[in-house]
Amino acid sequence: MTFDQLKSTLGAGLLSFPVTDFDAAGEFDLRGYAARLEWLSSYPSSGLFAAGGTGEFFSIGLDEYDAVIRTAVHHAAPTVPVLAGVGYGTRIAVDLAKRAEKAGAAAILVLPHYLVFAEQEGIIAHMRAICDAVGIGVIYYARDNTRLTPASLVQLAEVCPNFIGYKDGIGDLQLMVQVAAATGDRLIHIGGLPTAEVFAQPYLEMGVTTYSSAVFNFVPDLALRFYAAVRAHDSDTVRGLLKSFYLPLIALRDRKRGYAVSIIKAGTALVGHPAGPVRSPLTDLAADERDALAALIAAHG
């Protein structure tokens, strides 16, 4: 698949963002993860993020990473490209990117570098080192302490042919318009905010045709129905699902820090596909919060 074909494929549908399975002792559950990927692959998606934010990349040990990516590649649908998360400092990110390429990933998703804020030239150097280390596509994830300007993105695209995408986790609509105008179709633009569905309509108007859906993990039919409604400009369905499902879910998610992941893992258990507990420093939902989530899921079939 060429870089242009990869961008076209990713932009054609909804992106899957699976959780990573851990057993009761908190160890990586390879069989459970494989079964999860096979179940999710029975639903249409245009790409799969392995070891991403919802997949608890930050909690996966270096001794586990290769197995997570390899399992995702082997058990995802054959036509669905796997994008592997990398992060931390430049040397670790480069090492992980090489491992992901060896495991068969189609592209790299560069999560925020560790802890520090940095100037534009430093972030460009970080991204360029990752791009230069692999021959597969590389997507930049803008959020938290890493924010490349439109000019920096253009500069990076000029020197790195395999720099193919910009995933937005900031939610600044003005900045997103500027990024889209500056980079055009040189990069694929992906929605990447927690509960990205809330931003799906305005982002589509500026050419962002896809986003990663965390709720795809436990209500894939609903996630696909919402995505189809957005693409069809079916505002009634979009508003209805936002009001009845997504906004109550966000209210529950916002009760505690880290629940953007915890609530998804709780949802998988409630629909019969448990992924085990989250790893510290995250915490699982309290019993009353699980009950509220169960009621929300039940109300939507």
Image (tube, helix red, strand yellow):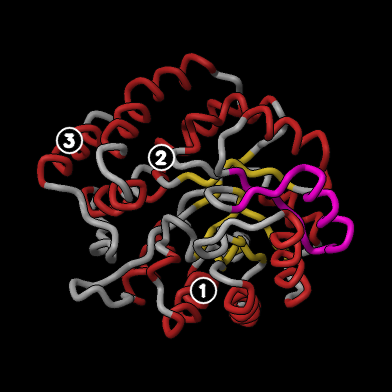
The quadrant holding residue 117 is bottom right
Magenta range: 146-168
Q: Residue at x 77, y 64 (%)?
A: 1
Q: Residue at x 60, y 20 (%)?
A: 233
Q: Which mark is residue 140?
A: none
Q: Which residue is mark 1?
A: 69
Q: Residue at x 42, y 55 (%)?
A: 54
* Type of amino acid at the residue the image marks with label 1: Ile
Query: Is residue 160 depicted above or below 252 in this figure?
Result: below
Query: Is residue 115 depicted above or below 169 in this figure?
Result: below
Q: Residue at x 56, y 35 (%)?
A: 171
Disc 2 to disc 1, C-alpha distance: 25 Å
Q: Is residue 152 magenta?
A: yes
Q: Which residue is mark 2?
A: 221
* Type of amino acid at the residue the image marks with label 2: Asp
The quadrant holding residue 291 is top left
